[in-house]
Image (cartoon, rainbow, N blue to C red):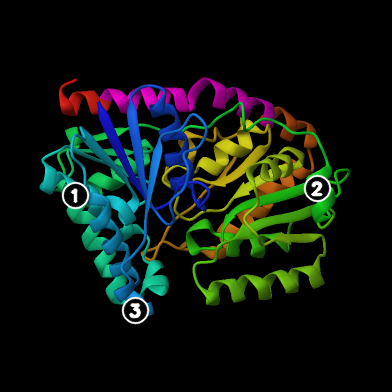
């Protein structure tokens, strides 16, 4: 069987959970079958033990700022070509879904699409793409998913969302295969060189956030909650890749106010290499995931694998990862029509209370962290993800 994975992100250009997913899935599948990755961006050499990789750039004639979505589709056109002797294509996110859909129509091969998020459930993307661009991404996603031979949801909650948003889909075509994590790579690192480089005191408690600066990740609510979080605790923000200049400016202004009001705020703006993130996670008392939309949340698995207790929003697939009271604390969340919390003050207070609860009892936080790593090892490995994914491929191609 020869499989081609279609994706926007692939190392070294990875900035979100979908990119992490494709990186490790490709590595796991390469041990089991013939795999090639087609991605956005420059050509790159394959990783050690990984599949062959081909990069594609957008059409130069679409260089205008108003054509961002059209530039994506021009990459999709190139990715869908030249697929002779391919058994199946597997696309990830709307950026590559249309390439998979076109490959299916052009070459008569099955198309599998993994849903890492759903465009209609992320209305804030209008700010990033403009009204017309957002409508086009919704069209692309709907067309590709409804035409796919199989749709993989990364959680049971995501499967429910897929069937609710796209009721034309046959439920039998929507399968759940959870995300995974490499627990050999994501393991506690008790060194302190990274902490020293960024001014984090290993002798003091710390609360850490790792994620992009986007409405979806809820960083604004964590910053509001920080006013009520024990000021003796360091707040470490590994937050970069802002969706828009406006949201970056908003976060910057809030961080500056926090530094004046409570101090102990460390903002690391660059996207850090994985080993640096692992060390920072390991030393944190609490990892916070304040997302308002999260189909699963690989970052929670990353923190748990580093034996760090998690405070996370009880939204999407997060409750399938974080066990409330055992590996962390889940904060109740009631979304409004725009995806934001119906009562932001209640949500913010919930975050602060949960974080302070663990800061006040570091022994309990340690126990939760140890339980979190055990759960990762038992339930969320890439070996199992690759095996189940290959089994689905086999059903579709008759192998």
Specify the label residue 66 is tagged with: 3
Label 2 neighbour load within 10 Å: few <14, some 14-19, many 20+: some
Label 1 neighbour load within 10 Å: few <14, some 14-19, many 20+: many
Determine the CA span between mark 1 and mark 2. Answer: 45 Å
Whichever of labels 2 and 3 marks the residue nearer the N terminus, that label is 3
Name the residue: 55% across, 72% down. 247
Secondary structure mostly seen in the magenta stretch:
helix
Residue 231 placed where, x, y %?
Answer: 82, 58
Specify the label residue 195 is tagged with: 2
Q: Dots 3 and 1: beta carbons under 8 Å?
A: no
Whichever of labels 1 and 2 marks the residue nearer the N terminus, that label is 1
Instruction: Tell me the SS state at disc 2.
Output: helix
Residue 293 placed where, x, y %?
Answer: 44, 53
Q: Which residue is mark 1?
A: 101
Determine the CA span between mark 2 and mark 3. Answer: 41 Å
Q: Which residues are magenta?
A: 369-391
Residue 338 placed where, x, y %?
Answer: 38, 66
């Amino acid at each position: 069987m020869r499989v081609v994975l279609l994706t926007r992100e692939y190392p070294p250009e990875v900035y979100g959970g979908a990119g992490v997913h494709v990186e490790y899935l490709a590595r796991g599948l390469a041990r089991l079958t013939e795999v090639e990755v087609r991605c956005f961006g420059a050509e790159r050499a394959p990783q050690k033990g990984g599949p062959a990789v081909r990069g594609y750039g957008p059409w130069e004639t679409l260089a205008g700022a108003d054509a961002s979505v059209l530039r994506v589709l021009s990459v999709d056109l190139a990715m869908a070509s030249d697929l002779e002797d391919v058994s199946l294509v597997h696309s990830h996110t709307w950026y590559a879904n249309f390439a998979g859909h076109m490959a299916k129509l052009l070459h008569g091969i099955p198309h599998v699409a993994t849903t890492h998020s759903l465009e209609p459930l992320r209305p804030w993307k209008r700010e990033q793409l403009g009204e017309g661009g957002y409508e086009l991404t919704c069209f692309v996603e709907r067309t590709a998913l409804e035409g796919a031979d199989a749709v993989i949801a990364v959680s049971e909650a995501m499967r429910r969302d897929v069937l609710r948003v796209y009721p034309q889909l046959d439920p039998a075509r929507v399968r759940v295969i959870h995300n995974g994590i490499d627990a050999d790579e994501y393991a506690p690192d008790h060194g302190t060189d990274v902490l020293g480089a960024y001014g984090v005191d290993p002798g003091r408690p710390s609360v850490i956030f790792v994620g992009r600066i986007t409405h979806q990740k809820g960083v604004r609510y964590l910053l509001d909650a920080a006013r009520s979080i024990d000021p003796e605790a360091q707040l470490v923000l590994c937050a970069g890749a802002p969706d828009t200049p406006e949201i970056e400016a908003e976060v910057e202004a809030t961080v500056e106010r926090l530094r004046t009001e409570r101090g102990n705020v460390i903002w690391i703006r660059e996207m850090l290499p994985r080993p640096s993130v692992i060390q920072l996670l390991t030393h944190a008392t609490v990892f916070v995931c304040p997302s308002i939309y999260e189909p699963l949340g690989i970052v929670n698995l990353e923190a748990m694998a580093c034996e760090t207790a998690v405070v996370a929003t009880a939204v999407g697939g997060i409750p399938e990862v974080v066990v409330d009271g055992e590996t962390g604390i889940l904060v109740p969340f009631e979304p409004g029509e725009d995806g934001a919390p119906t009562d932001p003050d209640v949500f913010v207070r919930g975050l602060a209370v949960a974080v302070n609860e663990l800061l006040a009892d570091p022994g309990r936080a340690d126990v939760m962290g140890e339980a979190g790593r055990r759960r990762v090892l038992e339930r969320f490995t890439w070996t199992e993800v690759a095996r189940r994914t290959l089994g689905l491929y086999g059903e579709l191609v008759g192998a």
